[in-house]
Image: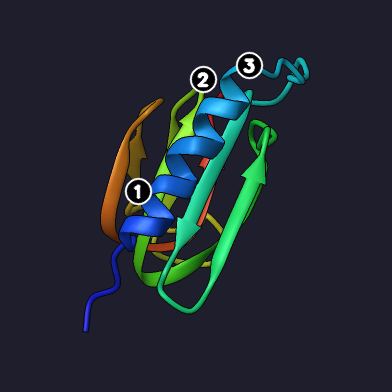
Amino acid sequence: MRMRFSPRSALVVTAGALALSFVNLSTASAAPGVVIMENGSQFKQIRDPQGGQCHPGLGPDTAIANRTGGTILLFPDGNCKTRILNPLGPGEFRPDENVGSFLALD
């Protein structure tokens, strides 16, 4: 069974992204904004992900939104080590990904 953002979750994500657009709390080595993940039973937000740092994901069937100013790379493994990677640009959303981990490039 595939998990997707519910209409309520999509509204929360949109409202959160809009609220973050008014806040400027970025650091020099972080991608300003938030990465939002949900896989039905779990919900996770990473604010201002540090560039070059591996962040854990939620695994298969994850809906992910990149609401940062930079590109992130999605990896199927939990430690950003596989050669299979998938870029997700600023403002992009994917409803069904295998996100073992991600790496912010900016």
Query: Label 2 crowding class (10 Å Cα cut-off): few <14, some 14-19, many 20+?
Result: some
Q: Is residue 20 above or below residue 86?
A: above
Identify the amino acid type marked 2: Gly
Kindly tell me whether residue 73 is visible in this rendering: no
Which label was assigned to residue 36?
none
Please name the residue shown 72% across and 15% down the image.
24
Q: CA distance from mark 3 to mark 1?
A: 31 Å
Q: CA distance from mark 3 to mark 2?
A: 13 Å
Query: Label 1 crowding class (10 Å Cα cut-off): few <14, some 14-19, many 20+?
Result: some
The C terminus lies in quadrant: top right
Q: Nearer the viewer, mark 3 or mark 2?
A: 3
Q: Is residue 43 above or below residue 95?
A: below
Kindly tell me whether residue 65 is visible in this rendering: yes
The residue to which callout 3 is attached is: 22
Q: Nearer the viewer, residue 9 or 63?
A: 9
The residue to which callout 1 is attached is: 85
Which label was assigned to residue 69?
2
Identify the amino acid type marked 3: Phe
Instruction: Return the disc, 3 or 2, that comes first in the chain's sequence.
Output: 3
Q: CA distance from mark 2 to mark 1?
A: 19 Å
Residue 26 placement (x, y as % from top left): 73, 19
Residue 47 placement (x, y as % from top left): 67, 39
Please name the residue shown 29% across and 65% down the image.
4
Please name the residue shown 59% across and 59% down the image.
44
Q: Is residue 80 above or below residue 70?
A: below
Identify the amino acid type marked 1: Leu
Please name the residue shown 35% across and 36% down the image.
88
Residue 2 placement (x, y as % from top left): 23, 76
